[in-house]
Amino acid sequence: MRTPGDSDDVIVVGGGVIGLTTAVVLAEAANGRRVTVWSRDPAAETTSAVAGGLWWPYRVEPVDEAGGWALRALRALSRLAERPRETGVRMAEGVRAGVALEELGSWSAEVPGLRPARAGELPPGVAHGLRARVPLVDMGVHLRYLRRRLEAAGGSVVVRAVDSLETAAEHAPLVVNCTGLGARELVPDPEVYPVQGQLVIVENPGVEEWFVAADGAAAETVYALPQPYGLVLGGTAREGVWETAPDPAVAEAIVARCARIHPALATARVVGHRVGLRPCRSRVRLEAEELPGGRRCVHNYGHGGAGLTVAWGCAREAARLARDATRRGDGG
């Protein structure tokens, strides 16, 4: 009996939202090629599973390219929002505080309905912001959807640690590296570093719209994201911090900041804590290279705080690079 990953055509290393989305795109356009995801951790234990799930370009470079990837993802997620129970994606109204349209990249001009918020649409103490209707994703449901979609296209997922890209290349002529923070050791790429994010989940006292106030350079953020499992409160953005255990003092401060926006949160019952490490880099690495021995590799990592936001756009670009790399490998 064949063991998954022993004789595949494409191995995608990394089972978070970037890896699974990339694998789906590759498998659905594979023309019979077999696509297998090798993931050190089950999807539920990846950084993607911890994410708040709001579509918005955040801590991702380069800005112009990331904006293009984000718009492609916006279109894909908007279609998935037609089936929210199945995909985990829904369109949600909310406010991005403290920013004006002219401060955003050119991508903002193509976001339907994005506009300055009127005074009556802002919480007390918030001077200005933007009003938007964008995808808000239940990441647990979405990751399971991506796996089902991959399997429906003939792909598979194997929980398997990888000690080198060359090891993966022993099992397939094409490797796609979607390892996020793991790329720091696997490639190795010292440019990859963590930006720690801590959040708190509370029982929702009736908050129906999302709210975000997040300076791209600040170590503390404020956001409230209504999800089916509770209200997600954040957060932190601590560069270079590897700790994944929740800090009770930080959690208390997060709730206090959010309670200034929604006072009822001061007494909301806490139902969970999460910590994730965003895989940041000076710029996303999305390129192809030849591995020792002649096998091909496409890198797709370093998406910072915008993995969900750019996943479909980067997956399409990674698939294009994979096609080109395969043609070169065939002598085309």
Image (tube, rainbow, N blue to C red):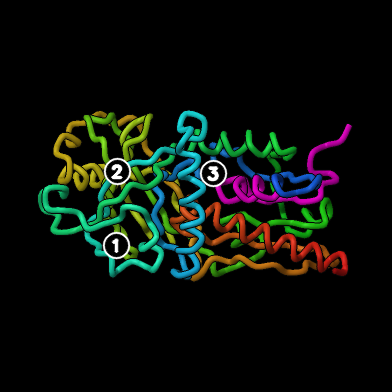
Look at mark 2 in the image and give the residue it sits on: 93
Of callouts 1 and 3, which one flags the residue occurring earlier in the amino acid sequence? 3
Look at mark 3 in the image and give the residue it sits on: 46
Q: In which quarter of the image is the C terminus?
A: bottom right
Q: Residues within 10 Å of mark 3 (few under 14, many from 20)?
A: many
Task: Answer left or right for 231 relative to 121.
Answer: right
Task: Give the residues in magenta.
Answer: 1-26
Q: Distance between the residues labelled 1 and 3?
A: 25 Å
Residue type, label 1: Asp
Identify the residue at horizontal 89%, vertical 31% (top origin).
Answer: 1
Q: Which of marks 1 and 3 is in front?
A: 1
| Rendered view: 200 above or below 175 | above
Front residue of this view, candidates 184 and 127: 127
Is disc 2 placed on a helix, strand or loop? strand
Q: Position of residue 145 (x, y in %)?
A: 57, 35
Q: Where is residue 318 in the image (x, y as percent from the top left)?
A: 64, 59
Front residue of this view, candidates 173 and 218: 173
